[in-house]
Amino acid sequence: MHPAPALLMILATAALPPGLADPAAPAARGFLPAGTPAELRDVGLLARLRDPGVRPVGFSSYDRTGGNNDGFNGTYSKLRVEQGNSVLAELSGPGIIQRIWFTHTVGERPGLLDRKREHIRIYLDGKAHPALDIPVEELFSGDHSLFPHPLVVRGSGGFVSYVPIPFRSGCKVVVDGQGVRFYQIGILQLPREGSVASFTDAPDTPLREELRRTAAVWSDPEKGMPDRATGLLDAKYEVEGLGGSTHRYVLPPGPATIRSLEVTPAPGTEEAWKAARLRMAWEADDDSAPAVDVPLGAAFGIAYGSAPYRSILIGQKDGTWYDRYPMPYRRQAILRIDTEKPLKGTIVARYVKQVAADDGYFRASWREATPARKGEDFPWLKQEGRGHFAGVFLMTEGTSKLPYWLEGDDRFRVDGTLAVHGTGSEDYFNCGWYALEGRLDRPGTYPVHGFSVYQNQGERWQVAAYRWHLPDPVPFSRSIEAGIEHGGQNDVAADYRAVVFWYSERPKP
C-alpha cells in the first residue's frame, strides 16, 4: 500500500459520414459527457474523442515530501479540516464526480475509517444542504438504489464507486472526523455551465431506473452489445496455418465499427494463439504501420495461465476470447495474425455500419521491460496529438518475497504537465493492501478492474491486473506520457509487460 499525490488530472470504398471532409480525421469538437448512467452502459461512446475543453481533476492522499507516508498516518489525507471533519475534494464550475475509491484504514482491521458509521457528504452547486449524505460503508454496500452493484464494488481490499455525480457549478466532498487514510476521487471538469443536470437523491428521481439498467449491463457484458435488430453484422474467418505463417484479412468496407473481436482456438492450439502477434491497421492499403501491434493472448487479457474471466470489455467465455473495445474505421481495416507455431481456429469481427463524426481510432500498444529499469517508471504511453487513455492490462513478475513492486505509483503527464500521480499500483486497479488475508491475497475480477492473476510460483511471484477506463477515460489535447513505478521509488526488480489501450485522432503511428 503506497497512496501518493493528490491527483490533478489536467488529467472497397463506401460513402463517408456526413460532415467529414477527411475520411481519416474525426470531427474537431468532440463528445461532451453529461454524467448520465446511460453513458456508462453505451460502450460505443468510449471511441468518441472528448471535447477539448474537458479535463480530469483528481484528489487523493499523498506524501508531500515524496516519501511513503501516503495515508498510513493520515498526515496528508485531506485538503483541510472543517468543524472537525475532513474535506477530501473541492472544485468550482461544472463537472462530474466519476470515481470514488477508498481502502481499509488499517489493513488488518475490518471496516473503513474508524468504524464509527462515518458519513460521506457531497455538497453540490454551493448549497448548504448536501446532495448526498450517507454512511461511507453503505455507499459501497451495493444495497442502495442509487449506488447499485456492480457500479459500486467492495472486494480485493478496495471500495470503489463509478456512479456518476454531475454538478452545475461546484462540488465539495466531506467525510466525518479525521479517520480518512487512503482515498482517491476522480472528477471530470466541464468547459461550460448548463451542460449537466446536478445529481439528486430525491425519491422520485429517474436516476434509480437508469442506474438499474446500467448495472444490468455491467453485470452481463452481452447486454451491452448491439444485436441483429440494431444492425450487428458478422465477418467470420477460418484460420489454419503452420508455424511461421502470416494470415491477413481485409475487413468489410467502412464506415463501420467493430463492436466485438472474437477468437475461438481449436482444442490444443490455445498456446499457439496466445503467442501469436495481432496487428490491425485503419484507413490503409497495407499493414506496414499498424495501429494495433500486440501479442494476441495479452490483447485478450490472458497471462500466466489465468483462469477464464469476464469483464465488460475483455474476457473469455465458453472457449471464445473477446475484445469489445469499439474499433471504428471510415474506409478500410486490415487484420493480420503472425504465428510461430501451428494454429487453427476462427476469428469473428462483429460490427455495425456506423461511425460517429467524432470517433477516434482504437490503438493498442505493447510495452515490455525485463527487468524494469532501476530509477525509471515503466512506460505505458508516450504520444503526441489528441486522444484519450482507455485502459491497461499489466503483467508483472519477480523474485522478491512478496510483490513489493506494487508499491509503485501510476503517473500521467498530460499536455506537458504532471497531471496524475497515483497512490500505489493496487490502488490504481481499485484494490488494496496486497498480501493481507481478506484483501488482495488472491485473484479477483470485476466489470472494469481486477487482478486476474495473483500467485506465487515457487520462488517467483506473478501478478496480472487490468483497469478499463470505460467510465473515466483520460483525455489529452496535445500529448500524454503515462507510466507506473516498480516499487516505491522504482527500486524493486521485476519484469514488466503491458498492453495499453487508447484512442487517437490519427489512424496510424
Image (spheres, grey):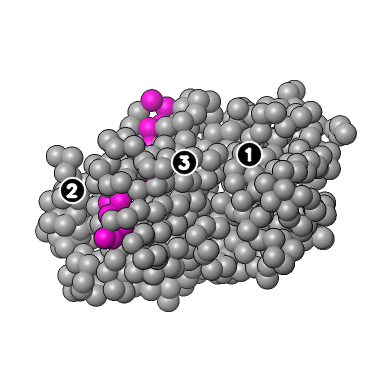
The residue under label 2 is which amino acid type? Asn
Residue 164 lies left or right of residue 212; in this view the side is left
Real-space CA distance between mark 2 and mark 3, rounded to the nearest whole angstrom: 26 Å
- Earlier-in-chain disc, 2 versus 1: 2
The residue carrying mark 3 is 368
Q: Nearer the viewer, mark 3 or mark 1?
A: 3
Task: Residue 402: say if magenta.
Answer: yes
Please give the name of the residue rendered at 72% of the width and 32% of the height, measured from the top-left corner: 287
**Residue 68: numbered disc:** 2
The residue carrying mark 1 is 292
The residues colored magenta run 401-416
Q: In which quadrant of the rendered image does the C terminus lie?
A: top right
Helix, strand or loop status at disc 2: loop
Real-space CA distance between mark 3 and mark 1, rounded to the nearest whole angstrom: 15 Å
Please give the name of the residue rendered at 80% of the width and 53% of the height, measured from the top-left corner: 240
The answer to whether residue 443 is seen in the rendering is yes
Residue 37 lies left or right of residue 118; in this view the side is right
The residue under label 3 is which amino acid type? Glu
Pick the front one: 187 or 333 = 333
**Residue 235: numbered disc:** none
The residue under label 1 is which amino acid type? Val
Pick the front one: 188 or 183 = 183
